Amino acid sequence: NFVVMVIHIAPIGKETKHVEEWLREVTPVTKIWLIHSKKKDGVVDFSKYAKNLAKKLKKDYSGIEIKSKIIDNPFGMDDTMDAITEIVTLEEENDVLRQEFAINVTGGTNVMATGAILSAMLLGTKAYYVLNRDKNPGQKKYVDELPIPNIGIIKMNKTQQKVLNIISKGSFELKHPTSGKEEIKLGVITNQDLLEKLKESQYTGDKRRRQK
């Protein structure tokens, strides 16, 4: 049983069957974002593959919305990761939750696939890999959810991010227990100093507010 997804994000190249296979098992879907590169050396026009796929999917799945995100370099991991982050950020403005995103990490170049996996970790979304039906006949299912650990740094609220930033830049001076030599440890800060840097020192007497 798959969690209901709303937004699907799929890197593609010449091969697009993984998107069709994906939709057979992971439904319903309201929108698909296809990530692909530009026309290569005047020979391969990847936008054509995207357009042909969009035409077929709209025919097979009524009401589906399909958008494309073009990247400059299919062999640049940052290009794919930036594209996925931009898509998620854009869709979140429409109140789409992180658990309603699903990233298909099967298609495109190996670099694009790796970028898609890393994006799922950092953004805290679902990630799926699609088996090739021709190479794996007779399977009960062809879509597997990947057990990707959710780092979810970007999911932190502004206060949490600010606290981590202050701690990382913090320092604390102490004396070595035996030599008595003063040492400075980086990435360390006292609770009191942290509160002051957060401009919360006026609440130090309020236990509930301080704890928050």
Image (spheres, rainbow, N blue to C red):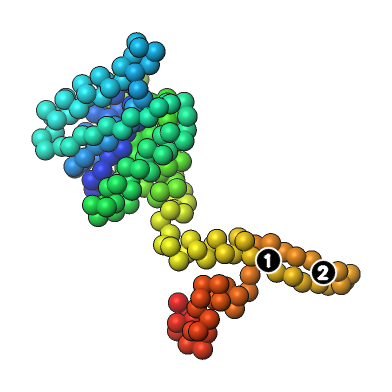
> What residue lies at 59% left-to-right and 64% top-to-bottom?
167
What's under tag 1, amino acid-wise? Answer: Ser
- Looking at this rendering, what residue extends furthest in the top direction? 43
> What residue lies at 60% left-to-right and 60% top-to-bottom?
168
Secondary structure found at label 1: strand
Task: Compare residues 18 and 82 and report the one nearer the observer.
Answer: 82
Position of 55 with respect to 47 (left or right) is left
The vertical placement of 148 against 59, above or below, is below
Q: Where is residue 142 drawn, in percent x and y?
A: 31, 31
* Disc 2: CA contacts within 10 A as few (<14), some (14-19) or many (>=20): few
Asked if residue 3 can be seen in this view, the reply is no
Position of 31 with respect to 194 (left or right) is left
Q: Where is residue 107 drawn, in percent x and y?
A: 36, 27
* Disc 1: CA contacts within 10 A as few (<14), some (14-19) or many (>=20): some
Position of 111 with respect to 94 (left or right) is right
Secondary structure found at label 2: strand
Asked if residue 77 can be seen in this view, the reply is yes
> What residue lies at 51% left-to-right and 72% top-to-bottom?
198
Which of the 4 image quadrants contains residue 83?
Answer: top left
First in residue order: circle 2 vs circle 1: 1
Which residue carries the number 1 mark? 171
What's under tag 2, amino acid-wise? Answer: Glu
Q: Please give the label number shown on residue 182.
A: 2
